[in-house]
Image (tube, rainbow, N blue to C red):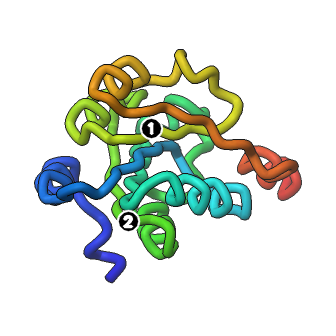
Amino acid sequence: MIREKIHTAESLARVLKKRGRKKVVFTNGCFDILHAGHVTYLEQARKLGDILVVALNTDASTKRLKGPKRPINVLKDRAKVIAALESVSFVTSFSDDTPLKLIRKFKPDVLVKGGDYEIKKIVGYEDVVASGGVVKTLPFLEGRSTTRILEKAR
């Protein structure tokens, strides 16, 4: 079951073309060390549609964005853990610093990011809105973050 959820961008694009009237929700991130904040966020995102696509930054992309000591978990492991969540329909990855190419390829109905983003500055905002979709932010679960977990572990 988990393997059926993990796709390349190309194979997922083919699957999503067959979605019919199902509403696709798209989100992205590193999801390096999965914690309760991530799980809550993904559960909330799923409630916004029928299909939740999670795009993971590759290891190289995560390193560029988060620094030389990240990711803690390699992409293959992060994908398997995210795919195991009931709220997640599909997992894919991207090597660029932003998921703009995937957003343009998948044309989601809903684009979601965490509450620390200003909606109109979210990568893909213009593309999603232009195609009739919506962009939303979801609140964080207070006190839960990968950075905080890593600081506590030190």
Q: How many marks?
A: 2
Vertical placement of 64 versus 146: above or below?
Answer: above
| Horizontal side of residue 26 vs 29, given as left or right | left
> Image point 53% across, 17% down: which residue?
120
Q: Using the rendered view, name the quadrant where residue 5 is placed.
A: bottom left
| Secondary element at image label 2 | loop
What residue is drawn where x is 29% and y is 57%? 22
Specify the amino acid type for callout 1: Leu
x, y (%) of residue 44?
A: 61, 56
Height in image: 3 above or below 67? below
Residue plotted at (64% across, 63% down): 39
- Name above or below for residue 134 compared with residue 20: above
Q: Residue furthest bottom?
A: 1
Q: Picture quarter containing residue 96?
A: top left
For the N terminus, the image quarter is bottom left
- Quadrant of the rendered structure where residue 43 is? bottom right
Pinpoint residue 24: horizontal percent, then vertical percent: 34, 51
Q: Residues within 10 Å of mark 1 (few under 14, many from 20)?
A: many
Q: Which mark is residue 56?
A: none
In this rendering, position of residue 5 left or right of residue 66? left
Disc 1: which residue: 111
Q: Return the residue at label 2.
A: 89
Q: Amino acid at mark 2?
A: Ser
Query: In the image, 149: left or right of 101?
Result: right
- Under tag 1, what secondary structure? strand
